[in-house]
Image (cartoon, helix red, strand yellow):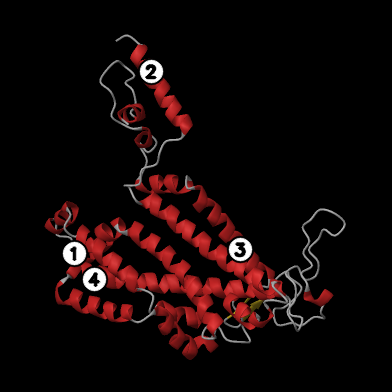
Amino acid sequence: MSELNSALQVPPSDGGSADETTIEQRQTVGLSQGQIVRKRFFHHKGAVISIIVLAFVIVLAYSSVGLHMFGISIPGWWQWHWNATPPLINRGVPTLNLIPGPGFGIGPHPFGQDQIGKDIFALVMRGAQQSIMIMVLVGAVGTGLGVLIGSLAGFYRGIGDALLMRFTDVIITIPFLVIGAVVGRAVGGFGAPVLGLFLGLFAWTGLARLVRGEFLSLREREFVDAARVSGASDKRIIFKHILPNSVGVIIVSATLLMAGAILAETALSFLGFGVQSPDTSLGVIVSENQAAFATRPWLFWWPGVFIIVIALTVNFIGDGLRDAFDPRQKKMPSPKALAKALARRAHATRTPK
């Protein structure tokens, strides 16, 4: 281990004392904090691939069946509407065939059709739109409320902290699925945007506790004391000094909140408390076709695949952001970098002073 640690240190280039700078530190010399975060994030292969996959899913969903919300209707390039009922072709079996040969092609219904002829590709794309919209709204509203409540409680402490945290504890004791069922029953018929907004009003509790803990720790640091001595207001200390140092925890928690939101929406829609007909979501598609699981399994394959892909990609992105923002994360140098360091160490040892 001691040999490895010494190899990771940069050998002297002028015969002087050994440089204690490691390979990892050399890679970030002269970079700003933002550049270091971007460099670390883009070295996380899983997170980068997840961003590409998630972007592809979003573009595919919103370009294929078009944008239909708030009275705005922009058609997409796909030929079928999700509520259209074209004639059944080959008993609704998917026409997608990716095996090279005479049958290779997409066909008119690549994901198949349900019992009455609805195109599953159009349904899944519309369902992905609604699920992604709810995920983003829950993440935005929940993050905003969590940061606000957690920062006020952690910075001011005292009776305000006690009241806010006891209110948070009360909401935490109620299972989110129960809250979601009540909210979904009340506003699910108004569409995915309203449902996502109201679910976000109850999804901030965990983030608020994390932000409070960060503020309780950071408010006692020397740079905050220096800001107080210089006459900075509470608002400036919160937004210019403490909050930027908490952004890592906030961003990572927000991505995990979004991943949990799409799974919660799927569960609520499957139980009948989420998005209501005539609209649809990925959970609604699975719920409406559960009786045909044995005879038409493709009705579950595609919505299930998209649920898993969206949830996994958001989780991987959150994992990459955690590694990028956490300065305590240590990355083992690659074999190539380690071999170069060992070669430099051996050359420095042989070279006479």
Q: Is there CB contact under 8 Å for labels 1 and 3?
A: no
Residue for point 27% across, 59% down:
240
Tell me how far mark 2 sits from mark 4, CA to CA: 55 Å
Query: Residue 276: x and y, percent?
Result: 57, 86
Q: Which residue is mark 2?
A: 346
| Kind of element beneath mark 2 | helix
Query: Residue 312: x and y, percent?
Result: 52, 61
**Residue 222 seen anywhere in this rendered image of the structure:** yes
Residue for point 36% across, 43% down:
330
The disc, 1 or 3, on the residue closer to the chain's N-terminal end is: 3
Tell me how far mark 1 sits from mark 3, CA to CA: 45 Å
Q: Is there CB contact under 8 Å for labels 4 and 1?
A: no
Which quarter of the rendered picture does the N terminus lie within? top left
Q: Is residue 4 left or right of residue 98?
A: left
Q: Nearer the viewer, mark 1 or mark 2?
A: 2
Disc number for residue 57: 3
